[in-house]
Image (spheres, rainbow, N blue to C red):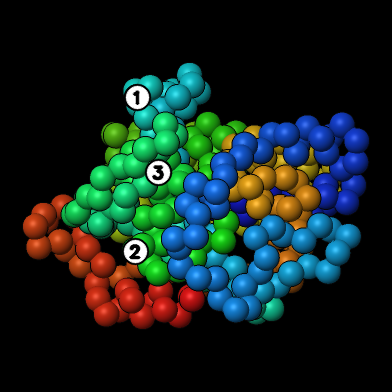
């Protein structure tokens, strides 16, 4: 979500002024995954007022129908840069952050719902790259879906959990996020308590702080040094970081400085994996234009209601019927 917020601001300018090689380069930065073909028709229905699968080109009227996006932050373990930033071994990746972004019809409001990665869920059977399928699994951690079957299984698991059709998918990795924050010149955050987490290498006193890319990544990942050490405390920090980065786009004259804007856009698009409906700069531009006039105070951040899992004090499960009511409001 952090990188996506920056892309939205950048493509508003570059989408119209980025003709030629610069536009081509940014467009080809974005990696693609075909969610729709992999999952077929066995999915929740789109709302009647939903947007079309692809965002409208900049030259056409912007589609402002209801839209739901699954945005994942991946703790990718591939590549030297990701390993250096805490990505672990080269044997896979996990969805370290998961947010369902709901855009109201007419873009009068938006809701960002964070799903704790420690939530126990039923993981559905998912298609594999080899043409087979995985087995259904019960009471497994939510983030195991991405680790097992990548973006396709993550989307299918979220749709089963929520009953909400994910119109689009966006993903950002460790190294890409750190580069993005550095390209922006860092980000300012405020902590209400001291944070001391040796695992994320984050040590901050309560108060205001200016973080570079590596520090911002640690801030987004820390959990043992804040609150009760659960994923819920980390989610609060992540949501604070999202808002700080969104404000950074319009601050300091970023959108009026083409050279700096290009550097930021290059970092943002280079960190993205998108579904085939958002895997081009023109499609991201269409989405960005549709939210251009959405007031910041109309964006609500919440956490999926959860309670401690009966089977494991270190895990949570959806708190019903509250969780069901939340997802119903987004259909």
How far apart, in angstroms, are the residues tagged by discs 3 and 1?
Answer: 20 Å
Q: Nearer the viewer, residue 9 or 331?
A: 331
Residue 14 in the image: above or below residue 311: above
- Numbered marks: total: 3
Q: Is residue 175 left or right of residue 26?
A: left
SS label for mark 2: helix
Residue 157 in the image: above or below residue 44: above
Residue 69 in the image: above or below residue 127: below
Instruction: Point out which mark residue 33 bears.
Output: none
| Residue 309 placement: quadrant | bottom left
**Is residue 295 at all visible to an observer of this figure?**
no
Instruction: Point out which mark residue 91 bears.
Output: 1
Q: Earlier in the sequence, mark 3 or mark 1?
A: 1
- Residue 49, given in percent of the width and then of the height, sits at 63, 78
| Residue 157 placement: quadrant | bottom left
- Residue 199, given in percent of the width and then of the height, sits at 29, 34
Q: Dot 2 corresponds to which residue?
A: 161
The local crowd at label 1, few if under 14, some if 14 to 19, many if 20 or more residues have their Cα within 10 Å, is few
**Is residue 12 at all visible to an observer of this figure?**
yes
Furthest residue toward left? 311
Camera-nearest label, 2 or 1: 2
Question: Which residue sits at x=63%, y=47%?
Answer: 276
- Residue 132, given in percent of the width and then of the height, sits at 37, 38
Q: Earlier in the sequence, mark 2 or mark 1?
A: 1
Question: Which residue sits at x=20%, y=67%?
Answer: 307
Q: Earlier in the sequence, mark 2 or mark 3?
A: 3
Say if mark 2 contacts mark 1, CB within 8 Å: no
Q: Dot 3 corresponds to which residue?
A: 127
SS label for mark 3: loop
Camera-nearest label, 2 or 3: 3
Q: Is residue 226 left or right of residue 49?
A: left
Q: Nearer the viewer, residue 186 or 290?
A: 290
């Amino acid at each position: 979500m952090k990188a996506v917020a920056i892309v939205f601001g950048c493509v508003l300018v570059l989408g119209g002024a980025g003709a030629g090689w610069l536009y081509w380069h940014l467009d080809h930065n974005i990696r693609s995954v075909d969610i729709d073909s992999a999952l077929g028709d066995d999915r929740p229905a789109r709302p009647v007022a939903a947007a079309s699968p692809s965002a409208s080109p900049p030259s056409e009227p912007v589609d402002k129908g209801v839209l739901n996006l699954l945005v994942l932050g991946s703790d990718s373990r591939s590549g030297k840069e990701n390993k250096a930033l805490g990505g672990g071994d080269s044997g896979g990746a996990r969805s370290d952050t998961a947010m369902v972004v709901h855009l109201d019809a007419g873009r009068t409001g938006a809701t960002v719902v964070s799903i704790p990665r420690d939530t126990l869920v039923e993981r559905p059977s998912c298609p594999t790259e080899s043409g087979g399928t995985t087995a259904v699994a019960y009471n497994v951690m939510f983030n195991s879906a991405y680790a097992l079957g990548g973006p396709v299984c993550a989307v299918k698991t979220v749709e089963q959990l929520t009953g909400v059709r994910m119109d689009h998918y966006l993903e950002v990795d460790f190294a890409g996020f750190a580069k993005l924050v550095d390209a922006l010149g860092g980000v300012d955050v405020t902590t209400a308590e001291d944070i001391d987490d040796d695992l994320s290498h984050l040590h901050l006193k309560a108060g205001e702080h200016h973080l570079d890319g590596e520090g911002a990544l640690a801030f987004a990942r820390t959990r043992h040094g804040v609150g009760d050490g659960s994923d819920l405390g980390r989610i609060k920090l992540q949501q604070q970081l999202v808002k700080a980065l969104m404000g950074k786009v319009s601050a300091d004259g970023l959108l009026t400085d083409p050279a700096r804007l290009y550097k930021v856009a290059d970092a943002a698009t280079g960190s993205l994996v998108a579904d085939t409906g958002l895997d081009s700069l023109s499609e991201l531009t269409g989405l960005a234009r549709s939210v251009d006039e959405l007031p910041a105070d109309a964006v609500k951040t919440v956490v999926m209601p959860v309670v401690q899992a009966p089977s494991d004090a270190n895990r949570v499960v959806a708190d019903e019927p509250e969780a069901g009511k939340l997802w119903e409001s987004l259909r």
